[in-house]
Amino acid sequence: MKRLAAVIIACLIAIPGGTFGPSSRIARADTPRYTSVALDSLPLVEPESHGAQIVTSATYRGTTLTGGLALASGNGTAVFHLNHNYDELSGVVYDTHTDNAATFLVYDTSDPSHPRLLFSHHLDPLAHAPFRVQVRNLDYISVATNSWDLFVQGTLSTGSLPPTATTVVSRYPTANAGVPANSKVLVGWQPFPGATNYLFHVWVVNTDASATITAKTPLAFSATAYHSTRYTWDDTGFPTGAYQYALLPLDAHGKALAGWSAPTQITIAS
């Protein structure tokens, strides 16, 4: 019954219409192209999950990471119901301890009495590492730490990235979406091969006729998203109207791996 409840919650989350989260999933049989959702957009399965929490941000070596999964020391474990919907789990895992190493583990727990190890990676103190795990046709998975605290930013995907992809593809907010004024807007995009960091830039296209512009009115904003495919933009003070945002993928040395993404237009509404 508890697993059935988790399935119902997952279905409710997949209903379209959310402004700040990923759009609803489309079945692989209907859409073979690449689609993805953030791992932490799925609910934790209870009571199998323990010492795990979905959080809005975490700090790693002075950098704020937006959105992810915190696994507490002492074998923190998060269980997710995939319902056979995904092909791959990928992302980055961070050891947030200054003195203690940890091991990151991913299991197939479709049969909870016989968990099957899919992936294991040892991290030294304050280390981070990318990971890719095949999860095709799996019903349940668990991600865990065998010892000390870990922070995980993961993406569940279906299909493959187009081989001809030349730049970043934005996920949300989607084109022509409306976002509230004076709020925190979660921006997400698909990972770009080889990219470690991303530049995010948003600028005004056309303000509403009622907007008042002064020398202190913000009309553009730029930031760098480190080791993440998400960024939370605070649009406080920006006048209502139409805006566009774009992304630039960078490697670990700050070299651009492609050009700017095609601009996505959104509207700040009062």
Image (cartoon, rainbow, N blue to C red):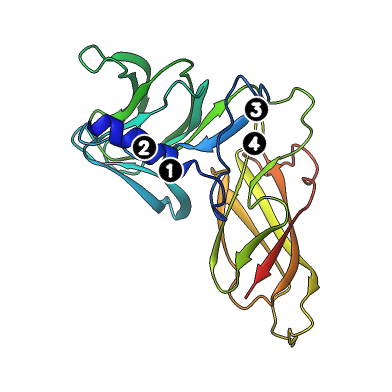
Distance of label 2 from label 1 (alpha carbons): 6 Å
Mark 2 and mark 1 residues within 8 Å of each other at the beta carbon: yes
Q: Quadrant of residue 255?
A: top right
Q: Is residue 155 above or below residue 55?
A: above
* Residue type indicated by callout 3: Tyr
In the image, residue 123 sits, relative to residue 97, either above or below, namely above
Residue that carries the numbered disc 3 in the rendered image: 34
- Which residue in the protein does label 1 denote? 12
Between 92 and 240, the one lying in front of the other is 240
Residue drawn at x 35%, y 24% as measured from the top left: 141
Residue 204 visible in the displayed image:
yes
The residue singled out by tag 2 in the image is 8
Q: Secondary structure at mark 1?
A: helix
Q: Position of residue 150 (x, y in %)?
A: 33, 39
**Viewer-nearest residue: 7 or 151:** 7
Which quadrant of the structure image shows residue 100? Answer: top left
> In what element is the residue under mark 2?
helix
Q: Residue at x 80, y 25 (%)?
A: 164
Q: Are marks 3 and 4 in contact (CB under 8 Å)?
A: no
Which element is circle 3 on? Answer: loop
Q: Which residue is mark 4?
A: 195
Cα gap from disc 3 to disc 4, whole angstroms: 18 Å
Residue kind at label 2, given as amino acid type: Ile
Crowding near the residue tagged with mark 4, few <14, some 14–19, many ≥20 C-alpha atoms within 10 Å: many
Q: Residues within 10 Å of mark 2 (few under 14, many from 20)?
A: few
